[in-house]
Image: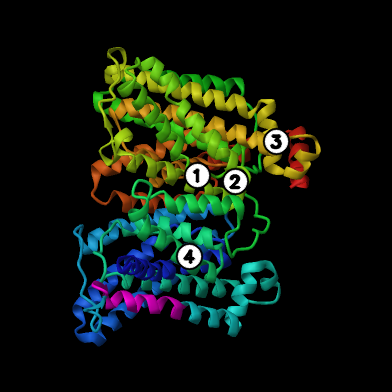
Amino acid sequence: MAFYVVQFLTGLASAASLFLVASGLSIIFGVTRIVNFAHGAFYMLGAYAAYTLTERLSGAFGFWAGILGAALIVAAVGVLVEMVLLRRIYHAPELFQLLATFGLTLMVEDLVVLIWGPSDLLGRRAPGFKGAVDFFGQNIPTYDLFLIVLGPVVLAALWLIFQRTRWGVLVRAATQDRDMVAALGVNQKWLFTSVFALGVFLAAFGGALQIPRDAVNHAMDLRIIVDVFVVVVIGGLGSIIGAFVAAVLVSELNAFGILIFPKISIILVFLVMAVVLIVRPWGLFGKPEAAARRTPGLTLNPWRPLTTQERMLAIAGLILALAVPLIAGNYALTVGSEIAIFVIFAASLHFLMSVGGLASFGHAAYFGLGAYGVAFLAKLAGLPMVVCLLLGPLLGVVGAAVFGFFAVQLSGVYFAMLTLAFAQIVWSIAFQWVELTGGDNGILGVWPEKWAASPSHFYWLSISIAALAVAALRVLVFSPFGFALRANRDSPLRSEAVGIDGKRIQWTAFVIAGGIAGVAGALFAYLKGSVFPDSLGISLSVDALVMVLLGGVDTVSGAVVGAIIYKALSIWLVSQTDLSKLVLGGIIILIVVAFPKGVVGVLETLRNRRRPQSKNSAVLKSQIESAE
């Protein structure tokens, strides 16, 4: 019994740091509506800054001053980021903000390696809390007891700030209706800046408090951000009390899951998150989400099929791509095959986002399921490559059909978070079901057959399938199904009034996108000759989002260009510099700020401006502007 009590107390200690970080993210999102993917980076910076300060400042006073000073320094950095970057994109759709903060995360990851090195750093023990308390033969670190007390103290302080101060009243009002707060004469810029500073301070403070417990390393940002998203969504976006309750729940599940359910310990928190979102989409203590602002997919320029000239140019481009093996070497062909595969993957997500208006944060689940489907058929059943390529993606279709049924019941950020939860559940199963998937060791030896084994043959196969997939998706966009899907995206009430079953067609689009992603995953398994749980990871889902947004969500096939640019650039940067993430993150931020419509979107805008307008086109433009 004493062992379980100690385990429970250990969970409470972990909950304190998790609550600090999650409360900061909840506050920021509640007011600014920014999905701050860089929140984990500020947590990591707090830990690194605290390590440096506590090593240089001696004594108990120096240690605690270093902890507090680190949080204040990182908060100042957060203010600078908010003023220089985020103020420029507050009115942009959430996905563009996610992209910008993801670019910031990439930059921070390389900066900490550049400043502090790649090795793990072990911080000092906390003065005054170096011992342990004996509890029926079980030792409880006194520092854990300190964290257990600190969590409720911080919760009480935040409650007093938000309930008993004028600033807190303004913050709560902005959470409910930002436009009304602005109408009352409140300076929104500085209100947002102060909220962002507090949120970043809490994240950095949580990271600084971890140095006596865990080693500081450059992977802590991605490790914490997933748990933080889970906590915020379970508790309810914008709810501090919800963040505290959810942090305790998640930490205790992590503490006891490995003891009671060792086979599914990683899955537990995501199962709880999925159940909460299905039963209560706005979280345990949250409130229903207000009507979202205009999102990507509601295009300013009417979409149209390709003209004859544009089709001829597309065919010419495809012919040039097919001719690459005549002049390129094996390495270039392998890179080209990978780019073609990610064109398929990005195009599938782009179809879901642009035509369906559904932004998935877990699209890698179906990419990975397609890869594992091929691996199972090839290694366990011994089926030929053609059969595996035809049947393997069906695993992605099944996963999309099951998960999509629940996901399309939600919308906005809650839809995105539920897709993330499902993707993490699949990743956890692949990681822990070692007997079937090989766990972290993966499934090896998934090689193509002789007819597709050479780099040139596999390149032609990948290019051909990519061309067919993109063409099929374009046909769907301009089919009756595509028009119905876009009608539901733009106006659910009007589409329902004319007899369109919105949830059914959204679910169908989800399954189609999952199946196309499964095709990409199946090819990827043969390209690499192996399958690992990373094929289902959150980082791959974010990569797909980046490709789509770089190309332009408001375009029909922008993901093709976005995937080519992003994948080619990332591969080239890795070969040219050790700071590839720093450069790539900077480029992503520059594109978000300077070209918010994406590369293809900007090119289309320039082309429309230069094209001479006839009388009919002027009338059409007038009608579009009137409708808008």
Q: Looking at numbered disc 1 in the image, what kind of residue is underneath it?
A: Leu
Q: CA distance from mark 1 to mark 2?
A: 9 Å
Q: Nearer the viewer, residue 439 or 6?
A: 6
Choose mark 1 or mark 4, whichever is in front: 4
Q: Earlier in the sequence, mark 3 or mark 4?
A: 4
Q: Looking at numbered disc 3 in the image, what kind of residue is underneath it?
A: Gln
Is disc 2 placed on a helix, strand or loop? loop
Choose mark 3 or mark 4, whichever is in front: 4
Image quadrant containing the N terminus: bottom left
Q: For the point 49% across and 53% down, which residue is it?
A: 272
Q: Looking at numbered disc 2 in the image, what kind of residue is underneath it?
A: Pro
Determine if the magenta segment contains residue 525: no
Q: Earlier in the sequence, mark 1 or mark 2?
A: 2
Q: CA distance from mark 2 to mark 3?
A: 26 Å
- Span of residues in magenta: 136-154
Circles 4 and 2: CB distance less than 8 Å?
no
Circles 1 and 2: CB distance less than 8 Å?
yes
Q: Residues within 10 Å of mark 3 (few under 14, many from 20)?
A: few
**What label sits on residue 25 in the rendered view?**
4
Q: CA distance from mark 4 to mark 2?
A: 23 Å
**What label sits on residue 549 in the rendered view?**
1
Q: Position of residue 248 (x, y in %)?
A: 44, 66
Q: Residue at label 2?
A: 296
Q: For the point 22% across and 64% down, which residue is it?
A: 116
